[in-house]
């Protein structure tokens, strides 16, 4: 039985690229604790660090045959863990800003139930105006907005040109803009 702990990182990397699971296991045992310690010093969250380490090694195994090591194995792993930490921190900042913004919104709203009622009324008004569009324009518009099809996909499905699709969508937007109040139009832009 081969003792992989005596192999160099370079030898393990070659074996890893060839799909050698034992080489991967040795890399995992050799670097997991060091990477964990490094990540934990930055994040101070055991669960998140465990997830990041697990994801790093999963990616290493799954992409082993396409990975390019511009430095050595340890340099690659430290760069990869650093990037994952930075991604996590950036995501946390965005999430925190979103939560703060949403909390502020809820505090300013006197009655959230009233907000939901108004939202339903705006949706009904918008749906009524969409239903009042000419049939072909409505069909193109709904394929664009409700089914999220591209202009090319709509043109192909309906047997019309991409230019016609673009024109129909633009005309529908102009019509809706003229028929909807500012509040309803803003709601439409944000949620449709």
Image: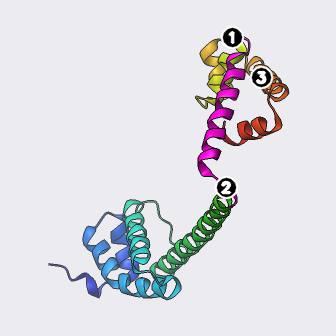
Quarter assignment of residue 109: bottom right
Q: Is residue 142 above or below residue 79?
A: above
Q: Position of residue 95 (x, y in %)?
A: 59, 65
Is 113 covered by the magenta stretch? yes
The quadrant of the rendering that contains the N terminus is bottom left
> Which residue matches tag 1?
135
Please report the bounds of the magenta region as a residue range: 108-135
Distance between mark 2 and mark 1 Cα atoms = 40 Å
Could you say whether the residue bearing mark 2 is in a helix, strand or loop? Answer: loop
- Colour scheme in the image? rainbow
| Residue drawn at point x = 45 percent, y = 78 percent | 73
Could you say whether the residue bearing mark 3 is in a helix, strand or loop? Answer: helix
Q: Main secondary structure of the magenta part?
A: helix
Q: Is residue 17 above or below residue 80?
A: above
Distance between mark 3 and mark 2 Cα atoms = 35 Å
> Which residue matches tag 3?
172
Q: CB under 8 Å between callouts 2 and 1? A: no
> Which residue matches tag 2?
110
């Amino acid at each position: 039985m081969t003792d992989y702990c005596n192999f160099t990182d370079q030898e393990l990397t070659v074996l890893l690229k060839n799909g050698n699971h034992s080489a991967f296991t040795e890399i995992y045992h050799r670097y997991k604790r060091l990477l964990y310690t490094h990540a934990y010093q930055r994040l101070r969250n055991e669960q998140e660090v465990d997830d990041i380490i697990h994801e790093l090694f999963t990616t290493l195994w799954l992409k082993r045959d396409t990975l390019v090591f511009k430095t050595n194995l340890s340099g690659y792993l430290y760069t990869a863990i650093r990037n994952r930490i930075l991604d996590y921190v950036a995501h946390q900042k965005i999430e925190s800003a979103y939560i703060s913004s949403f909390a502020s919104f809820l505090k300013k709203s006197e009655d959230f139930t009233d907000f939901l009622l108004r939202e339903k009324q705006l949706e009904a008004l918008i749906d009524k105006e969409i239903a009042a569009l000419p049939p072909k324009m409505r069909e193109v518009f709904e394929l664009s907005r409700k089914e999220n099809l591209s202009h090319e996909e709509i043109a192909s499905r309906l047997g019309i040109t991409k230019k016609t699709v673009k024109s129909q969508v633009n005309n529908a937007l102009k019509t809706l803009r003229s028929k909807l109040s500012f509040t309803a139009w803003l709601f439409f832009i944000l949620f449709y």
